[in-house]
Amino acid sequence: MEHGASGAAGAAEVAVTQPGAGWAGSFAEHPGYRRMFAPGRLTIGLFLPVWQFAGELEAMRGQGEVVQQADRGDLAGLWVRDIPLHDRNFGDVGQVYDPWTYLAWLAAHTERTALAAGSVIATLRHPIDLAKQAASLDRLSGGRLVLGVAAGDRASEFPAYGIPYDERAARFAESLPLVRRLLDERFPQVATPLSRMDGSTDLLPKPTAGAVPLIVTGSSRQSEEWIASHSDGWLIYPGVTHTDEGPTQLGEKIRRWRSLVPARQFKPVLTNEWLDLVEDPDHPPTPMRGGFVLRTGRHGLIDLLTRWQDNGVNHAALGVQHGRRPAADAVAEIIEHVLPVFPTLPAPAAATPIW
């Protein structure tokens, strides 16, 4: 297929993100960020779990081997979700383990892959706890953490925490800047409804590379202008993925958002797709389950990723847990045939954890 129009958009993105508007702050030395993100490039990540919980934890055994296969295969990132409670009204359990415990296990069993939260529900966590967990995981992984944050969309979880669901927008807008201050500053002075600190206390440890990338998910009940100013990147939903028009529409949204970023600084845009990657490499992209899952062969997947890259997407997190093939086979095919087209970026080596 021709990619001329979207390719021009990709070139435009590179033109406004060259040196002088490059990696924000200390991210130039951040192992996880640099592995995943660069202007005009797309990398590939893998959403966990690679097969779903179906009532018994024993049935999930063996996923660690697939995770280590992805690390050896040089995928850019591994993603975990934050879903505290199983809501029977959702068909998708999503995530069984606590994300921080899961990320700590991943840090101990992988060496290179960036570790990404997609996303921690910031409104259900106190900012001090969230910052402490993020800094600890960052240190124990050698600087590989990329922290996605969200306001939360499972209404049943909020009363369980004793938090009004309709307050999540305000809580998110207050929490994210405070998390950043706790990670960046020493002995901060804070006076907000969520925290009061008089400058005599500090949060330890501080991040390995000086900062933890904070990626806002969806709208998180904020304006695009707010996200452009307060985030280090944007994880957005892909929209239609089985037609040529879908990535073009996504690209228009990305370009509009990037025009709002202060000083046209490079901030990555990420998206994700749940795949049923079939063995026939020429199987056409076909929406399943109302568009929630894309059934496709690898050629259709490569074409989709190419269009995303041409339209400004910098990272694609792929989930194979809804596919019919064994997950190990699907992951192996992505590593062998798709990853060479969208290689992981060179990055500083992860630091040796101080422990």
Image: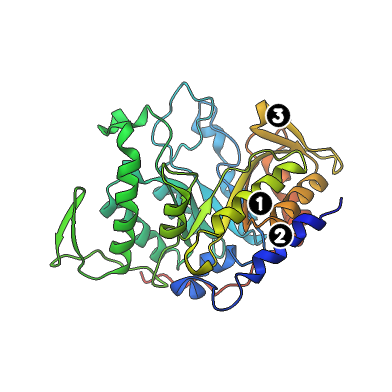
Residue 160 picture quarter: top left
Amino acid under label 1? Answer: Gly
* C-alpha span from label 2 to label 3: 29 Å
Q: Mark 1 points at which residue?
A: 251
Residue nearest the observer in this picture, 208 or 272: 272
| Label 2 SS | helix
In this view, the residue in front, 69 or 81, is 81
Relative image position of residue 235 (x, y in whole percent): 53, 50
Of pointers 2 and 3, the one earlier in the residue sequence: 2
Label 1 crowding class (10 Å Cα cut-off): few <14, some 14-19, many 20+? many
Residue placed under numbered mark 3 in the picture: 288
Q: How is the image coloured?
A: rainbow
Measured Cα–Cα span from mark 1 to mark 3:
23 Å
Q: Where is residue 161 in the image (x, y as percent from the top left)?
A: 28, 33
Q: Residue at x 24, y 71 (%)?
A: 186
Task: Read off the residue under disc 2.
Answer: 9
**Residue in the picture at 52% in, 65% down:** 33
Which amino acid type is marked by label 2? Ala
Q: Which of marks 1 and 3 is nearer the N terminus?
A: 1
**Could you say whether the residue bearing mark 1 is in a helix, strand or loop?**
helix
